[in-house]
Amino acid sequence: MKHVMRAVTVFRRLIIVIFGILLIPQALNLIPSDNGDKANIKLLQKDGPVTTYVIDKKMDMDGDVFTAEDIYITPKQVVLQYSIKKQDRNGWSFPNTDLTLIDSNGEEMISHGGGSSVRAWGESGIMFFDKMKDPDGDLIIKYKWYDREALLNISLPKDGEGQ
Amino acid sequence: MRRMTVMIVVEWCVAILFIFLFFSGGNSYVGSVSAKQAHELSERSYHYGPSKVVREVPFGDDITIYLGKYKNWFSADTVIRRTLGWYPGGGVNGVEIDHSKPLTYSYSISQHDKKLSLAQFYGYVTDSEITTVVLNTEIKEIEKSLMSQVIKEDRMFLFL
């Protein structure tokens, strides 16, 4: 009986140790780490004054939830910060080339880079676009991917209404 | 004795909680239970499809290719079995069918492990008069081979 008890104890503690170790990466993913994003946004100040607009607009993408978080406008570029909450693990990462920005003249703005990082719930990312031709105009986020298509209207408050 | 019982109960609770947390998602170790599920996950997470699977082609025990058509695109979504289940393995992206050409094709070569490098040539035949597609391969002018496939109703082909 004593041997059985000991074996059960060893088994139980093994479970705790093994699964504890396996859970470490998940636990680390839960720690909010916006360092990369923050550093990128700090770099924008090199361009001159940065206007930040909190957007927080959501869009469904096949069950995943895309959120346009913030838009930063500098004299040299427009930066979109987004996140995507994914329903599946082990799936493909979000192809952000399916996103473009359209300015108030209806023209697609040229993207010149971006990046994303994996989070516990999905991904967060950043995209850089050319500067706005019409600084007073609004923007549209256009999503086009195979037969999926959606537009997200972004109205940018004027004259210092922005945050 | 009572203290020990409390310890045991607490330890069991922690053990069960850990197991629950591990399997309740959020981990990327455990794959899908079946190849089909991994294929569906692959397309869903890529925001493509769901495509109509015209052929399911197993390659050995650990690789399955889903030759599929979705609207005006075709794909050869490949899923791979590893120790803890099935995972997406490439080829999920749809290739647009060019109706001005007799056939549209695509290919991929992927290294699976030290022993296996898998090349896939796949496509869609638009021209209704084409009944057979032949793939001519030549490796450094030494190894030459001809593979052919009869085109059936689904108009698709896949060479491995």
Image: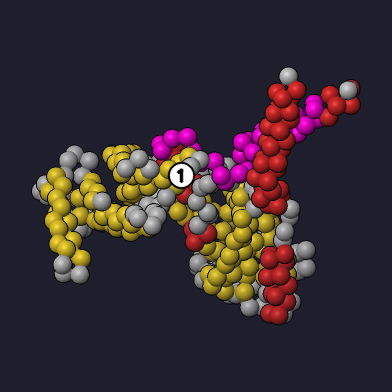
Which residue position is annotated with label 1?
B82
Q: Tell me what residue is drawn at x 50 percent, y 57 percent.
A: A95
Position of the N terminus of chain A by quadrant: top right
Is A131 positioned to the left or the right of B71 in the image?
right
Q: Is residue A23 visible?
A: no
Main SS of the magenta part reads helix
Q: Find residue A139 and report its horizontal and vertical position in percent.
A: 60, 63
Q: Nearer the viewer, residue A16 or A65?
A: A16
Question: In the orientation shown, which residue stands out farthest toward the top?
Answer: A1
Q: Nearer the viewer, residue B57 or A138?
A: B57
Q: Is residue A7 above or below residue B153?
A: above
Is B113 positioned to the left or the right of A7 in the image?
left
Read off the magenta span. B8-36
Decide whether residue B85 is among the magenta residues.
no
Is B56 positioned to the left or the right of A118 in the image?
left
Q: Tell me what residue is drawn at x 40 percent, y 36 percent.
A: B36
Q: Quadrant of residue A145?
A: bottom left
